[in-house]
């Protein structure tokens, strides 16, 4: 916690709870636009990242709005959620039927669940060479800070870049927006998406090329 006193700690906890409830409300609103879509298919992590990107965009110079209007926060976050919906959950219900103790047949298992675990005898692993995310269309405007960052690194062959230079290429001139970008870079580094090569200098993390182990 960033607060150093009980009053500040209470205020920060209430702020986190309010933010959580607001994101959950946006998630439900977005899923209600699709007929018969379970709200559980909305990802909280995606909603949180979209909200964080929205704050950074609003703080930048490109997010100017005319007087009397508001930024469409629900539309931006809801669009990200609808494009990255989670798969449907498998049903977890089972009919409550008493087992017949005198019968040799498992007539009580109406939903055909497996009685024993299935042993795994082999696993197929596909090894791909590490590449930069070049599938993004350069002519299309990036929809998130991560896509914009990938385009910047791709155009420069993934050369390490300072956070100050990244902010300049992204058009962030407001000090608050540049500070938000620095925090986002640290978060992506903790998630192993970026590699810190020097103080405030990053590049995209590429997986090591795997080689088959030598035979006995």
Image: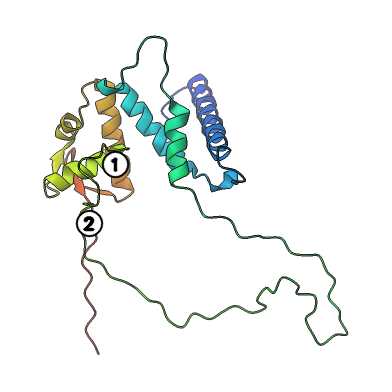
Left or right? Give the position of 124 relative to 151.
Answer: right
Q: Residue at the location (53% across, 24% down)? A: 10
Question: Who's the residue at 52% across and 44% down the image?
Answer: 42
Locate residue 187, reporting x and y percent.
32, 41
Q: Quadrant of the C terminus?
A: bottom left
Establish if 10 lies above or below 200.
above
| Residue 141, position as x, y percentages in the image | 26, 36
In the image, what residue occupies the spot 75% across and 74% down? 109
Please state the horizontal and vertical placement of residue 58, each as a whole percent of the image.
34, 23
Nearest to N terminus: mark 1 or mark 2? 1
Q: As rendered, which of 31 and 102 lies closer to the eye? A: 31
Q: Where is the N terminus found, in terms of image quarters?
A: top left
- Judging by the rendered image, the residue that carries numbered circle 2 is 206
Task: Tell me the number on the disc at residue 164.
Answer: none
Position of residue 42 relative to residue 25, above or below, is below
Q: Visible in this render: residue 197?
A: no
| In the image, farthest residue toward the bottom | 216
Judged from the image, the secondary structure of the residue bearing numbered disc 2 is loop
Q: Quadrant location of residue 62? A: top left
Circles 1, 2 touching at the beta carbon (< 8 Å): no
Along the horizontal axis of the image, is 56 left or right of 195? right
Check residue 146 in the rendering and tell me which mark sits there, or answer none.
Answer: 1
């Amino acid at each position: 916690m960033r607060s150093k006193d009980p009053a500040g700690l209470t205020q920060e906890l209430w702020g986190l709870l309010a933010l959580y409830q607001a994101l959950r409300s946006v998630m439900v609103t977005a899923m209600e636009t699709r007929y018969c879509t379970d709200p559980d298919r909305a990802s909280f992590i995606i909603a949180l990242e979209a909200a964080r990107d929205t704050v950074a965009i609003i703080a930048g110079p490109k997010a100017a709005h005319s007087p009397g209007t508001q930024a469409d926060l629900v539309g931006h976050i809801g669009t990200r959620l609808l494009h990255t919906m989670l798969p449907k959950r498998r049903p977890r219900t089972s009919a409550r039927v008493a087992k017949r103790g005198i019968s040799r047949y498992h007539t009580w298992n109406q939903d055909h669940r497996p009685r024993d675990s299935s042993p795994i005898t082999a696993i197929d692993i596909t090894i791909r060479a590490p590449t930069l995310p070049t599938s993004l269309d350069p002519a299309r405007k990036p929809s998130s800070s991560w896509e914009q960052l990938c385009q910047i690194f791709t155009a420069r062959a993934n050369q390490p870049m300072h956070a100050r230079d990244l902010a300049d290429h992204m058009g962030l001139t407001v000090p608050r927006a540049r500070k938000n970008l620095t925090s986002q870079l640290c978060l992506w580094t903790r998630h192993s998406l970026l590699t810190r090569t020097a103080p405030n200098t990053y590049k995209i993390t590429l997986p090591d090329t795997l080689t088959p182990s030598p035979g006995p």
